[in-house]
């Protein structure tokens, strides 16, 4: 009972913040709501007993990605205040399409399909297993991810650097 | 003697609650409320003492007396200051983002208070022994960054915005060496639970003694994370007036103040937990309550070092601050992590490993210091050469 | 116990909200925020399926970690592009960026 109440409140807050992210005129406020919605997803991870992912979510999404986004908004400021419309010409079509997609997804995923559910407990040493898994069975994706991060780091520096005259 | 063991006390308290006929859910709830109240009370009172100690120590270092009018030895000075801040007018700038502006101080305190949950104060004295404790500590720091950004933006003041930019740049940069140095004890212990980390450091096998350079890197990064001198250019009065909290007054300013001093205490407590053996010390296994005393003694020592540094050193320039993080601390911390990871896996007796690590740490420290010294000398020569050129050219023309 | 379909419903709605943001916003940074929302929805799905079908395997969590990594890399490069764009053109509205229009 308590868990379900927590779930519903978190879902309401997460989805409400997500709506504000795409609807609010002021981009800075949007970014703050984005953080709230990231945090809501972290709470979901805690409910799903994936504590490591919850902390990683806070650390990477809120600590790094959201901060980067807010930084970019500040650096390109003057762009977000309401002189022009925040929405483009196809916004109405987009709304219709999204609603249709949402309805279809909800219908198929939630009501149509009976997902097979296994009633199993999460092992107590999940973190250790995860760590071992990342350097044994899943070592190739792990290394590829590190390579990707390296490339992104160099690429971002090269692109954003001010050209010396 | 068993009465002095917090674990026994906790068991006794739980059976006492259950004997009243409470259900399990209520016991958990009451315990949560009690622990929260204790932690909050502890945090707030310790901040009053830390503020007094900071002013007193800074006074002594600079050959002054420090506060000495309110109460014995000026002990009630921080209470008086808190009362004064409460009576001040609460100003919100006209074109500020009102909600964000009011949220930021609360978020700053929240980010720090949440850290109290995972600090092991003594054997068994930890509010929540998370198995991802170290990562949790780092993650909470990102809320502090967001608070600074929000305050800087919402104040609608260019100095506040500049302060916010500087804060984010500094905190993000120094988070990297800090996390890398924190991962050295994690590598040794093979766990991220702060309580288990302390348990692994029995018999003076303190990680700070085995890897002194990692400890030093952590301390320097902690100074920067805490926005303390020599890294206090976020609130450099001569450049950007007061940093991101320039527009705040009264109680809201007090909240930022509270977060700052609480952060000092908690960064020290984490330093003690990770590197100085936490509550470990002689006779702890016999009298567990001694552990609490050891923990606080070590924490006070680190806090004192922080204050000593603040009272002594001048402020860094912003490019020096960045260069120190990215060109000195990050490579050193990376090398240390590599060294520790290799040493942990090699099959040799623990004592030999510890001695080897200690000496290689010292060697690395001196190599780094030598390199920095050479670089600074070259800089100085280049600068003086330019000076000479400038004066000679001005005399000829 | 919370039913699996609740998580799937929340993830689906979150995905759709992000999708709308991507399609309807003019500001490139806002579009990036929409993409991040969509990635979060996908991750929520992955973790929910992991918990409800194979909690004794690590595959689901590993997948989520890789997705988070890719999201971080994407945000870094994307924002660097927007900053460069802002310097070059003085705008980050994507319908005003029409260098290739004849």
Image: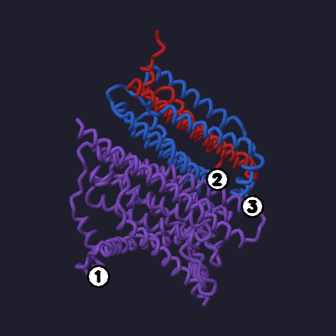
Chain colours: A blue, B purple, C red
Is A147 situated left or right of A157 in this image?
right
Above or below residue B224? Residue B273 is: below
Could you classify mark 3 by the number of other residues whose Cα lies within 10 Å: few (under 14), some (14-19), or many (20 or more)? few
Provide residue A45's location: percent of width, then percent of height.
60, 50
Q: Chain of mark 1?
A: B
- Residue A19 visible in rendering: yes
How far apart marks 1 and 2 lie (CA) works out to: 51 Å
Task: Choose between B209 and B235: the one closer to the eye.
Answer: B209
Q: Residue furthest bottom?
A: B1
Where is mark 3, residue-wise?
A: B345
Residue B73, label in figure = 1
Q: Chain of mark 3?
A: B
Where is mark 2, residue-wise?
A: A50
Which comes sooner in the sequence, label 1 or label 3? 1
Task: Choose between B125 and A13: the one closer to the eye.
Answer: B125
Helix, strand or loop for disc 3: helix
Provide residue B182's location: percent of width, then percent of height.
58, 60
Provide residue A31's location: percent of width, then percent of height.
44, 40
Quarter assignment of residue B338:
bottom right
Viewer-side label of 3, 2: 3
Is B186 situated left or right of B67 in this image?
right
Viewer-side label of 1, 3: 3
Q: Chain of mark 2?
A: A
**Which residue is located at x 32 percent, y 46 percent?**
B387
Q: Residue furthest front?
A: B396
1 and 3 marks on the same chain: yes
Could you classify mark 2 by the number of other residues whose Cα lies within 10 Å: few (under 14), some (14-19), or many (20 or more)? many
**Which residue is located at x 37 percent, y 36 percent?**
A26
């Amino acid at each position: 009972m308590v868990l379900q109440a927590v779930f519903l409140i978190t879902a309401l807050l997460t989805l409400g913040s997500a709506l504000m992210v795409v609807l609010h005129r002021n981009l800075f406020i949007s970014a703050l709501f984005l953080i709230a919605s990231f945090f809501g997803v972290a709470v979901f991870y805690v409910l799903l007993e994936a504590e490591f992912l919850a902390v990683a979510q806070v650390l990477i999404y809120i600590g790094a990605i959201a901060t980067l986004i807010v930084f970019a908004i500040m650096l390109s400021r003057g762009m977000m205040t309401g002189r022009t419309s925040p929405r483009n010409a196809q916004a109405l079509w987009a709304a219709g399409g999204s609603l249709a997609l949402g309805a279809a997804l909800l219908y198929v995923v939630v009501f149509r399909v009976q997902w097979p559910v296994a009633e199993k407990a999460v092992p107590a040493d999940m973190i250790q297993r995860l760590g071992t898994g990342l350097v044994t069975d899943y070592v190739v994706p792990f290394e590829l991810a590190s390579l990707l991060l390296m490339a992104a780091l160099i690429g971002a520096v090269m692109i954003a650097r001010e050209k010396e005259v | 003697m068993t009465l002095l063991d917090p674990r026994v006390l906790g068991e006794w308290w739980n059976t006492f609650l259950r004997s009243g006929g409470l259900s399990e859910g209520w016991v958990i709830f009451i315990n949560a409320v009690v622990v929260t109240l204790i932690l909050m009370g502890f945090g707030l009172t310790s901040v009053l003492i830390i503020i007094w100690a900071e002013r007193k120590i800074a006074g002594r270092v600079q050959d002054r007396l420090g506060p000495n009018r309110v109460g014995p030895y000026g002990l009630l000075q921080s209470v008086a200051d808190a009362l004064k801040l409460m009576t001040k007018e609460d100003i919100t700038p006209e074109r500020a983002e009102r909600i964000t502006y009011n949220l930021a101080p609360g978020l700053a305190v929240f980010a720090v208070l949440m850290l109290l949950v995972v600090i092991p104060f003594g054997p068994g004295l930890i509010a929540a022994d998370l198995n991802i404790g170290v990562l949790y500590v780092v993650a909470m720091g990102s809320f502090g960054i967001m608070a600074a950004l929000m305050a800087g933006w919402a104040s609608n003041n260019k100095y506040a915005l500049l302060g916010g930019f500087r804060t984010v740049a500094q905190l993000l940069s120094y988070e990297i060496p800090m996390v890398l140095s924190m991962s050295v004890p994690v590598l040794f212990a093979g766990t991220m639970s702060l309580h288990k980390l302390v348990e692994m450091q029995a018999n003076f096998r303190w990680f700070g003694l085995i890897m002194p350079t990692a400890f030093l890197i952590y301390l320097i990064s902690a100074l920067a994370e805490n926005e303390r001198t020599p890294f206090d250019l976020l609130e450099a009065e001569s450049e950007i007036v007061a940093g991101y909290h320039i527009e705040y007054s009264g109680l809201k300013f007090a909240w930022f103040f509270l977060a700052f001093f609480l952060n000092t205490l908690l960064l020290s407590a984490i330093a003690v937990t990770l590197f100085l053996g936490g509550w470990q010390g002689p006779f702890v296994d016999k009298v567990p309550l001694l552990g609490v005393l050891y923990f606080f003694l070590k924490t006070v020592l680190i806090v004192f070092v922080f204050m000593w540094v603040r009272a002594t050193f001048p402020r860094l320039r912003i490019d020096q601050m960045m260069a120190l993080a990215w060109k000195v601390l990050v490579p050193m911390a990376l090398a240390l992590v590599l060294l520790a990871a290799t040493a942990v896996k090699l099959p040799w007796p623990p004592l030999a490993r510890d001695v080897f690590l200690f000496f290689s740490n010292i060697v690395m420290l001196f190599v780094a210091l030598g390199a920095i010294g050479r670089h600074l000398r070259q800089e100085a020569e280049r600068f003086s050469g330019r000076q000479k050129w400038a004066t000679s050219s001005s005399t000829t023309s | 116990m919370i039913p699996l379909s609740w998580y799937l419903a929340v993830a689906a709605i979150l995905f759709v909200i992000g999708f709308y943001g991507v399609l309807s916003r003019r500001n490139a940074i806002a579009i990036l925020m929409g993409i991040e929302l969509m990635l979060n929805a996908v991750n929520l799905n992955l973790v929910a399926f992991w918990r409800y079908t194979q909690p004794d395997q690590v595959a689901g969590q590993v997948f989520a970690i890789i997705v988070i990594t890719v999201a971080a890399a994407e945000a870094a490069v994307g924002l660097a592009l927007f900053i460069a764009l802002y310097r070059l053109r003085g705008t980050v509205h994507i319908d005003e960026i029409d260098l290739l229009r004849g």
